[in-house]
Image: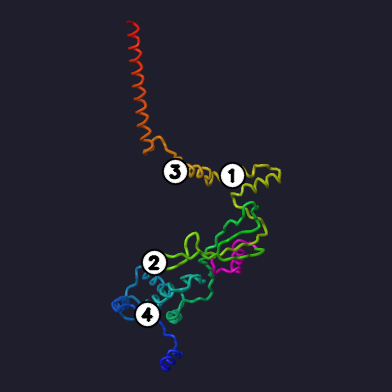
Amino acid sequence: MSIIRRALTTVSQAGPSTPPSIALTAPRAVRKRRDQAALNANPTGLPIAAKAPRVLPARLEAEFQALRTKGQYKGDEASGRKVFWDRQVLWRSRVRGVKGTKGEFLARDQGEAAEESTTPAATEGIIAQRIYLPNIQIRLMRNHTPPGTPYDPHTATFRIPHSMTKTDLRSYLTTLYGLAPTFIRTDNYFAPIKRTAKGSFKPEVGSTKSYKRAVIGLTEPFHYPDDVEELYAQGEASGVGEALGDERKRWIEENFNVEAMKESKKKALMKYHKGYRWRGKTHDNEGNTMREIMKKRWSKEDQLSEEVEKMREETRGLRIAE
């Protein structure tokens, strides 16, 4: 037992094994098909830049002959075509944003071309600029305002990824929007864990997913376009009255149809409400059908009552005459 215990407690000195590559773990048939496809694409096994076609395409052949007429690619036509083809491959694989035109690139002498045909494209004089394209989402949210408290226009709330820091957010707002936050406070919200149908546990997704909230301070107040009450207050302070607020309401209605959407939503809710339903006269449903049947029945009963009353009046008149 002591030998087994000592063997189990002994730390192995072997290092971690390196995982095999995807190419080596592919099925044998897949690897064979890939090797055959590569062989068919390049039977000689030489680099593509080293293989010059016997006959150039019509456009390249015309360009090559025009350059030979101007005195370039002198000597043997086959070797000149080979150098011309190498330079075409080098031009196509160049780094975009490099100074110079294609004519200047191809107008060099053959010795320089042969020397550069085996090297990557030149990168001297790059005029391009690296652009950072972030793959993150930063959403502006409305501030949390408890009931009975005024809205604070000198603060703004953002939802940012968990990996984003205060320094990143400050740099983002300063660079893109020219904002200088006076303070930044962050807190993390973690979605509740729920149990799936298979028995595993994972955080909820959707509107309740995990996020990070950032509250920043602004040097100037920020109001949303639909903050009409603020415009009314500004109008009263400046002596304009309700002109600013009415103009903003008119602009919102013309561009977003807020009142029309509220009316259509109200009708839809009335239609599906349990106690009170909105039904059109031409809407085919059980209620309208029964209502029409009862109307016809009541009209028939009214006609019968009138006929019976007439017959009674006639009978009463005959008795009086006798």
Marks 2 and 1 sit apart, C-alpha to C-alpha, by: 52 Å
Viewer-nearest of labels 1 and 4?
A: 1
Question: What quarter of the picture does the N terminus occupy?
Answer: bottom left
Q: Which residue is mark 4?
A: 47
Q: Which residues are magenta?
A: 161-180
Q: Which residue is mark 2?
A: 198
Mark 3 neighbour density, 10 Å: few (under 14) some (14–19) many (20 or more): few
Sequence-first tag of 3 and 4: 4
Q: Which mark is residue 274?
A: 3
Q: Nearer the viewer, residue 61 or 196?
A: 196
Mark 3–mark 4 CB contact (< 8 Å)? no
Viewer-nearest of labels 3 and 4?
A: 3
Residue 257 location (% of width, % of height):
52, 44
Identify the image quadrant of residue 39: bottom left
Sequence-first tag of 2 and 4: 4
- In terms of secondary structure, what is the magenta stretch mainly? helix
Q: Is residue 270 left or right of residue 247?
A: left
Q: Nearer the viewer, residue 148 or 101?
A: 148
Q: Is residue 274 above or below residue 91?
A: above
Of helix, strand and loop, which one carries label 1?
helix
Identify the image quadrant of residue 321: top left
